Amino acid sequence: MIAIIGAMDEEVAAIRNRMTDCAEENIGPVLFVQGYLNQTQVVLFKSGVGLSMAAMSTGLACAHYPLTGIVNIGTAGGLLESQCVLDQVISTQVTYHDMDISVFGNPRSFSSENRFVFNADPYYIEKAKTLIGDRVLVGPMVSGNQFISEESQVKTILTYYPSAICVEMEAAAIAHVAAEFKVPFIILRSISDLVIHPKNEMSFETYLHKASDRSAQLCFDFVGLV
């Protein structure tokens, strides 16, 4: 069974609309929906926004279901000038951009010396790469408890994580919990806004539904391969 996690109603709805044979179950504050996506058994749930909610809900899923993998879908903010809204992104690594314990020798980087860098499953990455089109980018991502909308925020992120392709608010926590439970994961997102552009928060509101749908379709195609 593969867990599919979205942070917001729009992201989860885009997946549920593609599922069959659905059955609901509440565990604590989280609604889990079991069913089939592209003939693959899945459990879908909304993590909620932010790292704490993502960690809590993912932990519940790992503890209560026989998970063989985790797919985090939804939207992200693009960090590259070459990106366009609705481009899709596939993770290789993910870490927290706003965690700083470098004073204890843990660098803010994607290096192996940072013990909070989590690697997406190599098999999942290779399968996802077979779905790549013209507007799909594979690379490292960063997460934090901030909606990134200021140039100064981008500058700080890229100072420490210059290879990051996007930023969002849940993936690192999901990956962290997945690593603790030894469940393979991958992040499949779609760009809803470009952080380097002015008024990107307006772009986010405008493109949320379209980006969610694009991410859901990528997820649909992906689970059919694994």
Image: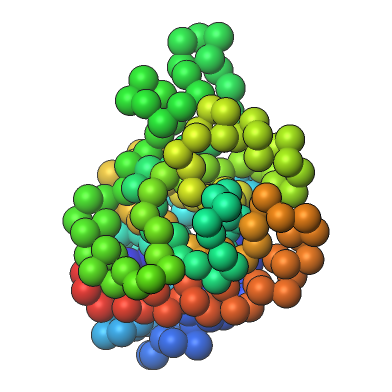
Judge left or right: residue 27 versus residue 202: left
Q: How is the image coloured?
A: rainbow
> Residue at horizontal 55%, vertical 17%?
101
Residue 55 image offset from top left, x and y in percent? 52, 47
Q: Quadrant of the N terminus?
A: bottom left
> Residue at horizontal 42%, vertical 79%?
217
Asked if 130 appears above or below 194 in the picture, the reply is below
The quadrant where residue 41 appears: bottom left
Residue 120 in sight from this viewpoint: yes
> Residue at horizontal 38%, vertical 90%?
21
Q: Nearer the viewer, residue 156 or 108?
A: 156
Judge left or right: residue 77 versus residue 218: right
Count of marks, rendered view: 0
Residue 198 image offset from top left, x and y in percent? 78, 55
Q: Nearer the viewer, residue 197 or 121?
A: 197
Residue 73 in sight from this viewpoint: no
Q: Nearer the viewer, residue 118 or 4?
A: 118
> Residue at horizontal 65%, vertical 72%?
208
Q: Quadrant of the C terminus?
A: bottom left
Asked if 177 appears above or below 32 in the picture, the reply is above
Residue 73 image offset from top left, x and y in percent? 47, 65
Residue 2 image offset from top left, x and y in percent? 32, 66
